[in-house]
Amino acid sequence: MANPKINNMLIPNVTTLPSNKNAENANKLKSGETSEFKGLLDGAIDQSAVGIPAQQNKGIQLSTHAMRRLQERNISIDKEEYTKLQTAMDRLKLKGGQDSLVITGKAAYIVDVPKNTIVTAIDKDSIGENVFTKIDSTILMN
């Protein structure tokens, strides 16, 4: 027979179980409250209903390669440049662009339109020296 003192220390003696009423009411919302999960779910359903993937609502993404190129070539994306890029992405989506070249007054960007991602960037002074391949569309944003 096991020592009762050791057993009680390791496994406490539970004499009462919670009633089902308490368990049922524990997660109920009070009058006028809404579930945080329901809000998130409704948002996801609303986005998919109009055909907007969740990725597109996050703004422009930068690939690791693009981040490196922006740093190496001293290209900064300020608010005005970001707005130009976002407008270009929106217009390219409407036209069915996939892998596109966006040229602004500052730089040229290769973008993956469906993923809303800048793949690489070329500074304004080097645009003429580059060959752009595997793109299906180009947009000039001045």
Image: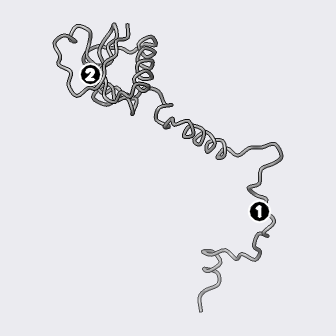
Q: Picture coordinates of residue 28 (x, y %)?
A: 77, 54
At horizontal 77% and vertical 62% (from top left) the residue drawn is: 24
Q: Where the C terminus falls, by quadrant? A: top left
The answer to whether residue 15 is left or right of residue 112 is right
**Snapshot quadrant of residue 97:** top left
| Mark positioned earlier in the residue sequence (2 or 1) | 1
Q: Picture coordinates of residue 78 (x, y %)?
A: 42, 13
The amino acid sitting under disc 1 is Glu
Residue at the farthest bottom position: 1
Q: Where the N terminus falls, by quadrant? A: bottom right
User: Colour scheme of this structure image?
Assistant: one colour
Q: Secondary structure at mark 1?
A: helix
**Snapshot quadrant of residue 70:** top left
Q: Picture coordinates of residue 22 (x, y %)?
A: 79, 63
Write down the residue under mark 1.
24
Q: Which mark is residue 69?
A: 2
Q: Secondary structure at mark 2?
A: helix
